[in-house]
Structures are given as structure tokens and as C-alpha cells.
Image: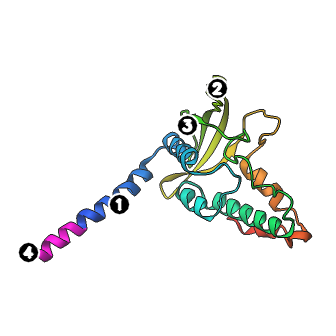
Amino acid sequence: MPARAAALLSLFLAALVVTPVARAADLGPQAAVQAFYELRMAQLPNGGAPDAPALALIAASITPRLHCLLKTAHRYDEAFLATQPGDKPPFVEGDLWSSLFEGPTRVKAQPARLGRDLAWVPVRMFFDDGGRTDATGWTDTVLLARIDGRWLIADVDYGGNFAFGNAGRLSGVLTEQLQRPDPALKWTGREVRGCP
């Protein structure tokens, strides 16, 4: 009897562990984007390319290519700091996930436009500062890819128009710098070509 009770307890605990994963796989694009940004605003520092612990926190929400680009960007920053300690590397500051350098304080994912295995989710973003509520905000668009039945963030199309913000796409901001050889860093530009 104790062995049977232990087996039943094991099955129950396994079901508890599997359930959150199954629920995550069921998230639609709009819900996946909203959940990602809420996680990002609550737990990730607003500091450019994520380090290993931060990247591990979001790894299940992003595509393998974007994961690789972000990991490579962090390696680039480390190489930059090792050779030019008095200067700031390109990916050490600012929010990569939005147009605004400071990043949003509130977001509202909008209904997705769906393709076969792609989705585009406009995200209304707001930056509340010093007790002042941002009523205007801006809209960035998140591109998702469906991989193994899950909607994963593949890119961000920056829609804001800020003097010191991001423009273009997240993948473009990353690859433009990472593909550029820099002999002082012993950076060939080939490092990024290994990303899927």
C-alpha cells in the first residue's frame, strides 16, 4: 500500500509540473506577448543585452535565433569592456524590447494579425514618470513564430519616434553591430553567423 500511495503521489506531482508547460504552449500570440512584457518589466533590468541569468529567464519565450543574437550581443559587450574599460559597449544600456530607451512601464498587447506560422502583435506602450500617467504612449509591433506549437517572440518592430530610442527592428539593431569586424576586440563579425 505505501508503494502504491507513493506512485500516486509521484503521478500527482508530475501532473503539477507538466500543467504550467502545457498552459504556456496553449497561449495565443496576444497573451504570449502580454505575459512576456509583464515578466520583462517585473524581473529584467533595463540594461541592454541580457546576461546569462536574465536570458535564462526569457529563453522559453523567444526563438532560438533571437536567443542566439542576444547571447552574442552580451558576449560582444564583454569583449568590448575587456579591451575598452572606460567606454560603454553598444548593448549595455537601454531597453532593447521597445522604442524608448527607458522602456515602458505599462503595456497592452493588441489582437494579433496571423499568418501561417507567424503572428504580428501591436503593443501599446506607455511610460509613466514621476507620478505622471502617460496618456499618449506609442506602438511597437512584436513578431512571433510558431515553433513546436508555441508562439515565440522572434523580433520587435520599433514604432516609436524618439530622439534617443531604437529604430528599425531589434534583429537589425543587433546584427548591424555584431556583423561588423572589430580587430581591437578580436571580433571578426562571423560570431553572429552561427545563429540559426
Position of residue 102 in the picture relative to residue 42 (left or right): right
Q: Residue at x 19, y 72 (%)?
A: 7
What segment carries the magenta color?
Answer: 1-10
The circle drawn on residue 1 is 4
How dense is the environment of label 3, judged by Cα within 10 Å: few (below 14), some, or many (20 and up)?
many
**Considering only order in the chain, which callout, 4 or 3, is on the residue closer to the N terminus?**
4
Q: Which residue is mark 2?
A: 134
- Give residue 117's position: percent from left, percent from top: 56, 49
**Considering only order in the chain, which callout, 1 or 2, is on the residue closer to the N terminus?**
1
**Considering only order in the chain, which callout, 1 or 4, is on the residue closer to the N terminus?**
4
Q: Residue at x 52, y 41 (%)?
A: 34
Q: Which of labels 3 and 4 is toward the front? A: 4
Q: Which of labels 1 and 3 is toward the front? A: 1
The circle drawn on residue 112 is 3
Element at badge 4? loop
Answer yes or no: do the residues labelled 2 and 4 have beta carbons within 8 Å? no
- Give residue 71's position: percent from left, percent from top: 68, 64
Camera-side residue: 126 or 121? Answer: 126
**Considering only order in the chain, which callout, 3 or 1, is on the residue closer to the N terminus?**
1
How dense is the environment of label 1, judged by Cα within 10 Å: few (below 14), some, or many (20 and up)?
few
Please say whether residue 155 is one of the residues in the magenta stretch: no
The three-letter code of the residue at mark 2 reads Asp
Task: Give the Cα separation between the discs numbered 3 and 4.
Answer: 52 Å
Task: Give the Cα separation between the discs numbered 2 and 1.
Answer: 39 Å
Q: Which of labels 4 and 1 is toward the front? A: 4
Q: Residue at x 13, y 73 (%)?
A: 4
Which quadrant of the structure image shows residue 82? bottom right
How dense is the environment of label 4, judged by Cα within 10 Å: few (below 14), some, or many (20 and up)?
few
Q: Which residue is mark 1?
A: 18
Q: Which of labels 2 and 4 is toward the front? A: 2
